[in-house]
Image: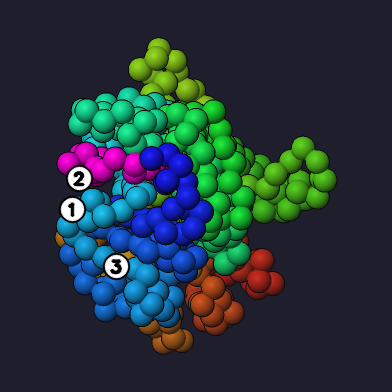
């Protein structure tokens, strides 16, 4: 059974099932299909399935052309029916792991997915979890569910964890050229999962266990949240000291060793940095350990939208303008540049805070033709000379590349740039204020 599965994978005869076709699952499915595997995508979202069948991608990192190509070659099929698991050799789970009430881990999507696998599992299959989660999930949650069938891991099926490393909007690092970590419950599982990924990814790094692989992902994002929080705090201090944080960070990064550049901003958004470290914090508390760095970093980053709005109020007050009824234009509402993704976006929190202060808020983002925030429907504002004159301040929250910043700077009364995109573009003026 073990040798037969290894041979199927080497010969690319193994059928691969991707459970969850979001920002991780869909690119992974396309990559497997492009590399010559037959792939079945499974998702409970009927709208997603319908779009894929039409050849329409809803993920920025997957083009319609790529999707249509694998569909045309019949390498990629999609369904909402989990019975399709019975036809595959490898199942990769790529479902969401958000934060629930009181910012605790919500692994309900993982549990539902693995339960569906359990109900359809076949001998000789390998199951790999890619969804970010706390250390121990694969062994403590997935393994008992799957072994409740009477099958034995390492003998009848194989189970491992491989953290997703997707950076939406990254033009260079894609699935194929981003090194892949893999840790199995058993040595056989590590080997089989590694063998599978080696067929589509340039470099695969095995680690000692599934728990070690889970911890790798959390260390990566904890490193980022802590360093972003540090530079955000330094940015707030620099404002008090009358210093330019952007000048400071640019000068510091000239040191050729012992320093890595991180930059401040209006807050931290996305599917990873504001969420994943809190999974580790929660797990630590269950073992009687307090992750002080994580908790403090999370707190600092969560205050940044409040700091931005407070600073904006002061900027307006210095110009004899109250924030109440002030007309504010938010540029960019996505959580990062050049992606169509609002998850945990600090721009949304900034809009909510401004609305509470009774400011008149508008937005412009080429990726979002409409927004609904707390029941209020919003349409994007036009960027033209006449319209820009209506706004007391333009606040740049996300620096999409397809925005004419020179035009913006030329015709806006006042710009509050929280991303330093104007200075980095060589655009300066008395009407521009940086974070």
- Label 2 close to label 1 by CB (< 8 Å): yes
Circles 3, 2 touching at the beta carbon (< 8 Å): no
Q: Position of residue 372 (x, y in %)?
A: 23, 64
Callout 1–callout 3 Cβ contact below 8 Å: no
Which x, y percent locates residue 203?
62, 50
Residue 296 seen in render: no
Q: Is residue 303 magenta?
A: no
What percent of the width, then of the height, locates residue 316? 45, 60
Q: Which residues are magenta?
A: 112-133
Q: Dot 3 surroundings within 10 Å: few (below 14), some, or many (20 or more)?
A: some
Residue beneath label 2, please? 120
Secondary structure at numbered mark 1 = helix
At label 2, counting other C-alpha atoms closer than 10 Å, the crowd grade (few under 14, some 14-19, many 20 or more) is some
Residue at horizontal 54 percent and vertical 28 percent from the top: 208
Please name the residue shown 19% across and 53% down the image.
82
Quadrant holding the C terminus: bottom right
2 or 1: tag closer to the N-terminus: 1
**Label 3 vs label 2: CA separation?**
18 Å
Label 1 environment density (alpha carbons within 10 Å; few <14, some 14–19, many ≥20):
some
85 vs 5, nearest the viewer: 5
Name the N-terminal-most of marks 3 and 2: 3
Name the residue at 23% across, 51% down: 86
- Determine the residue positioned at 38% across, 40% down: 1
121 or 8, nearer to the observer: 8
The image quarter containing residue 55 is bottom left
Badge 3 marks a residue whose secondary structure is strand
Q: Which residue is mark 1?
A: 83
SS for dot 2 = loop
* 172 vs 323, nearest the viewer: 172
Q: Indicate the quadrant where residue 122 lies.
A: top left
Front position in the image: 426 or 409: 426
């Amino acid at each position: 059974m073990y040798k037969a599965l290894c041979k199927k994978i080497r010969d690319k005869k193994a059928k691969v099932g991707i459970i969850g076709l979001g920002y991780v699952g869909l690119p992974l499915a396309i990559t497997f299909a492009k590399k010559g595997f037959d792939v079945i995508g499974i998702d409970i979202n009927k709208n997603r399935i319908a779009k894929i069948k039409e050849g329409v991608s809803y993920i920025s990192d997957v083009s319609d052309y790529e999707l249509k190509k694998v569909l045309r070659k019949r390498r990629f099929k999609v369904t909402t029916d989990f019975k399709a698991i019975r036809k595959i050799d490898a199942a990769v789970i790529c479902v969401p792991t958000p934060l629930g009430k009181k910012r605790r881990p919500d692994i309900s999507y993982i549990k539902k997915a693995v339960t569906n696998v359990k109900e359809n599992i076949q001998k000789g299959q390998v199951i790999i979890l890619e969804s970010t989660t706390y250390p121990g999930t694969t062994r403590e949650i997935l393994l008992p569910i799957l072994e409740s069938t009477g099958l034995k891991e390492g003998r009848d099926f194989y189970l491992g964890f491989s953290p997703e490393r997707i950076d939406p909007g990254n033009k260079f690092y894609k699935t194929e050229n981003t090194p892949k970590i893999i840790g199995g419950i058993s040595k056989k599982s590590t080997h089989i999962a590694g063998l599978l990924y080696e067929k589509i990814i340039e470099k695969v790094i095995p680690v000692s266990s599934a728990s070690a692989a889970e911890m790798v992902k959390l260390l990566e994002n904890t490193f980022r949240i802590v360093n972003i929080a540090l530079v955000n705090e330094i940015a707030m201090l620099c404002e008090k000291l009358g210093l330019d944080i952007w000048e400071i960070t640019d000068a510091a990064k000239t040191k050729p060793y012992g320093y890595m550049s991180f930059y401040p901003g209006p807050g931290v958004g996305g599917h990873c940095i504001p969420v994943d470290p809190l999974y580790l914090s929660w797990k630590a508390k269950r073992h009687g350990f307090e992750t002080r760095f994580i908790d403090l970093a999370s707190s600092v980053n969560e205050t940044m939208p409040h700091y931005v709005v407070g600073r904006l109020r002061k900027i307006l007050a210095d110009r004899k303008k109250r924030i109440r009824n002030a007309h504010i234009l938010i540029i960019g509402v996505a959580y990062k540049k050049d992606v169509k993704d609002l998850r945990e976006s600090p721009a949304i929190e900034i809009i909510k805070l401004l609305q509470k202060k009774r400011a008149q808020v508008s937005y412009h983002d080429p990726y979002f033709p409409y927004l609904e925030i707390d029941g209020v429907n919003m349409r994007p504002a036009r960027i033209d000379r006449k319209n820009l004159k209506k706004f007391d301040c333009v606040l740049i929250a996300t620096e999409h590349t397809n925005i004419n910043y020179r035009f913006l700077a030329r015709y806006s009364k006042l710009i509050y740039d929280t991303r330093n995109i104007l200075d980095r573009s060589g655009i300066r003026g008395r009407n521009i204020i940086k974070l």
